C-alpha cells in the first residue's frame, strides 16, 4: 500500500534547505526508497513549506528513515527551520489516478504480441470477472488468464481507451477493440478479417491499485456478424 509523509516546516532559509535536500538525494542514491517527492510553498506565507514524499509502502519509508544520511540531514534541516518541523504519516486509502493507470495498463498488457505477460501487477489473485457471455463468472487469476488466452488465440488485437472516468474505487473504461481474426474462435476458423468492437468495462480497485472485480458490456453480436457467423 502506498505511503505518504508530509513534512511541514517554516524557514527563512529555503535556498539553503533546498541545497541540503539536493545533497541528501545525491548521497543516498541507490539507497533512498522514496518513489516521488514534491515541495509546495504556502501562498499566504513565504516561509511556510510542505514537502510531500511518497513511498511504495510504510516499510520502505521506515528503511529510508533508518539510513544514517537521513538522520544527519534531519538534524541539519532542523537547524535551518524557524521552528520544529512536523511530520504527518498517511496511508493512502483512495487514489483514483492510480486506479485509472492500472486499468489502462491492464488493457495494454493483454493486447501485447507474444506470450501473455504476468497479470499480478494488475489483478488481485481472487479477481472476480462478470461477463454476460460467461456462465458462471470467471473467478481467480488463472481463470481470467484462460479467458484472455481464448481471445488472444483467435485474434491479434489492440484496445483504444476512448474515455476513462474514476469515482471512488470504480473506474469506467469505454474502449474500442480493433482486431484481425488470425485463429479459431468459438469454432469459427481463421478468416484474416479485420473486425472491430466497442464496449465498456467497469473495474473495482482496492487500495494498492489492483483490480478486484470487473463488469463487461460489449457488442459481441456485432462481432459475430462481422465474422459472418450469424444464422439467418
Image (cartoon, helix red, strand yellow):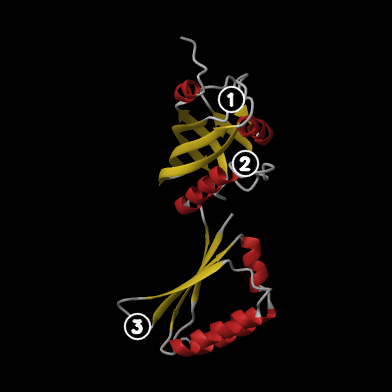
* Residue farthest along the top direction in this orientation: 232
Q: Earlier in the sequence, mark 1 or mark 3?
A: 3
Instruction: Look at the picture and state if 55 lies above or below 67.
Output: above
Judging depth in this view, the residue of 40 and 65 nearest the camera is 40
Q: Nearer the viewer, residue 52 or 124?
A: 124
Q: Residue 125: where, in percent of width, then height?
A: 66, 39
Q: Residue at x 47, y 21 (%)?
A: 225
Figure check: 164 above or below 192: below
Mark 2 to mark 1: distance in Å? 15 Å
The residue to which callout 1 is attached is 137
> Relative to 192, does residue 228 appear above or below in the rendering?
above
Instruction: Give x and y (percent) for residue 122.
Output: 59, 45
On residue 124, the disc is: 2
Residue drawn at x 55%, y 86% is 20
Per the rendering, the mark at residue 46 is 3
Question: Residue 45 occupies which quadrant of the picture?
Answer: bottom left
Amino acid at each position: 500500500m502506498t505511503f505518504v509523509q508530509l513534512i511541514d516546516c517554516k524557514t527563512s532559509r529555503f535556498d539553503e534547505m533546498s541545497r541540503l535536500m539536493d545533497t541528501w538525494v545525491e548521497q543516498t542514491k541507490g539507497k533512498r526508497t522514496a518513489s516521488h517527492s514534491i515541495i509546495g510553498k504556502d501562498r499566504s506565507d513565504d516561509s511556510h513549506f510542505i514537502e510531500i514524499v511518497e513511498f511504495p509502502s510504510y516499510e520502505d519509508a521506515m528503511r529510508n528513515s533508518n539510513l544514517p544520511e537521513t538522520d544527519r540531514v534531519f538534524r541539519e534541516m532542523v537547524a535551518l527551520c524557524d521552528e520544529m518541523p512536523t511530520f504527518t504519516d498517511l496511508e493512502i486509502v483512495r487514489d483514483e489516478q492510480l486506479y485509472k493507470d492500472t486499468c489502462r495498463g491492464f488493457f495494454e498488457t493483454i493486447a501485447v504480441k507474444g506470450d501473455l505477460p504476468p497479470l499480478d501487477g494488475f489483478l488481485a489473485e481472487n479477481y472476480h470477472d462478470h461477463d454476460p457471455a460467461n456462465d458462471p463468472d470467471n473467478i481467480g487469476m488463472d481463470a481470467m488468464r484462460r479467458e484472455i488466452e481464448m481471445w488472444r488465440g483467435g485474434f491479434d488485437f489492440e484496445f483504444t481507451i476512448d474515455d476513462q472516468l474514476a469515482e471512488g474505487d470504480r473506474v469506467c473504461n469505454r474502449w474500442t477493440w480493433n482486431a484481425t481474426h488470425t485463429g479459431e474462435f468459438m469454432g469459427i476458423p481463421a478468416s484474416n478479417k479485420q473486425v472491430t468492437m466497442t464496449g465498456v468495462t467497469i473495474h473495482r480497485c482496492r487500495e494498492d491499485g489492483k483490480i478486484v472485480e470487473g463488469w463487461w458490456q460489449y457488442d459481441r453480436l456485432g462481432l459475430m456478424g462481422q465474422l459472418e457467423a450469424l444464422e439467418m
